[in-house]
Image (cartoon, rainbow, N blue to C red):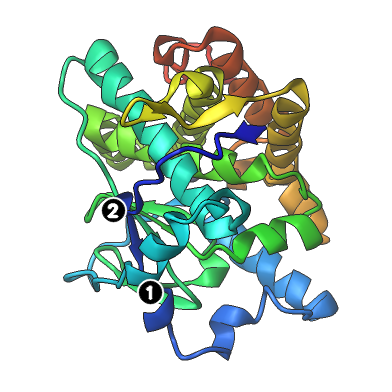
Amino acid sequence: MELNENARIDTSQIDDQRSAGGGGGGIGGLPIGGGGLTGIIVTVLIALVGGYFGINNLSGGGGEPQAGDNTKLRQECSQSDAIKQLDCRNALFVNSIQDYWADAFPQNFGDPYKPSKTVFFSNRVRTGCGAADSGTGPFYCPADDRVYIDLTFYRLLADQLGAPGEFAQPYVLAHEYGHHIQDLAGTEAAMRREQERNPSDANKLSVKLELQADCYAGVWAKNATGTDAGGVKLIKSITDQDIQEGLDTASKIGDDTLQQRSGGSVNPAEFTHGTSAQRQQWFRQGYESGSPKDCDTFAAGAVS
Ligand SMILES: [Zn+2]
């Protein structure tokens, strides 16, 4: 993947709350640091509860999200070597994903696209969906239309879950924006209603929602080199190796793989995100097609 060093990174799509975060240390930092075996167990337990990468729809405990301070990020990402910085690269990925959907959403769903900010946080964060910490992993909150990520999650992916490739980063973000698309399109609300009607199918429906978000991530990847900011291309190239890294990441965060990692047996009834094979299959489907219309995981027989 080659980013355009001349890209104009729009940091207004980010809400940088890292300096406001939970005071350092604490339980939020625990799974990330060199926690060894305990860290892995804690992480995987949390992963099994929250799932990677979730959609956070906790009711209650919401309220107004905090506002961050983008001054430092804006300065950093306006410098000539900005794309060497992890946070600026992630801001660029967000720009690219939203530039794609700004055109593709109206074309495919008939309504205008409504932008969503990504919140960078450290350790802990207050959201419209309640309080969260880093151990939750990245998530989308439908109540306040924002994506939340502690960027240290990528270290966890690399060191503990075995997905070190850099393409994991835009894959994670594009998956979360996939949830934003499902929110805007009404897919997410329809899925929740269906879950209430058929509680025994709740996990199966969740899997379909998550696999569709993986598919949307693949769709973005296919179209990423066509995105720009102010007429300046954001991403110069995406290689087969990048796509392989996306697939590798998908394979490391499948429910079956995470259950095995936690030392337990594989229990399909508890799947909420799909197996490693399914997550790879739908990311690949999105990438090969390049069209959101080919991401209908809710169609009869699309997910078995
Ligand atoms: Zn998800």
Q: Left or right of 245: which side holds 133?
A: left
Q: Position of residue 47 (x, y in %)?
A: 61, 60
- Quarter of the image where one finds residue 102: top left
Residue position for label 2? 12
Q: Three-letter amino acid code at disc 2? A: Ser
At x 66%, y 21%, the residue is: 281
User: Alpha-carbon neighbours of circle 2 within 10 Å: few (<14), some, or many (≥20)?
Assistant: some
| Residue for point 28% across, 45% down | 116
Q: Residue at x 47, y 26 (%)?
A: 216
| Mark 2 secondary-structure assignment | helix
The kind of residue tagged 1 is Val
Structural distance between the alpha carbons of marks 1 and 2: 19 Å
Left/right placement of residue 204 relative to residue 84 reads left
Quadrant into which the N terminus falls: top right
Which residue is label 1 attached to?
A: 125
**x and y percent of residue 7 in the render?**
46, 38
| Residue density around tag 1, few if under 14, some if 14–19, many if 20 or more, within 10 Å | many
Position of 9 relative to 18 (above/below): above
The image's mark for residue 248 is none
Image location (x, y in percent) of residue 215 = 52, 24
Judge whether 170 appears above or below 76 on screen: above
Does any atom of ligand 1 lie closer than 8 Å to the CB of label 2?
no
**Which of the two discs, 1 and 2, sits closer to the camera?**
2
Judged left or right of residue 35, residue 194 is left
Q: Nearer the viewer, residue 46 or 291?
A: 291
- Is residue 264 visible to the viewer in this orientation of the structure? no
Residue 53, percent from left and from top: 53, 49
The one of 23 and 59 positioned closer to us in this rendering:
23
Task: State which quarter of the image contains the C terminus.
Answer: top right
Residue found at the very far front of the displayed protein? 80
Element under disc 1 = strand
Comes first in the chain, label 1 or label 2: 2
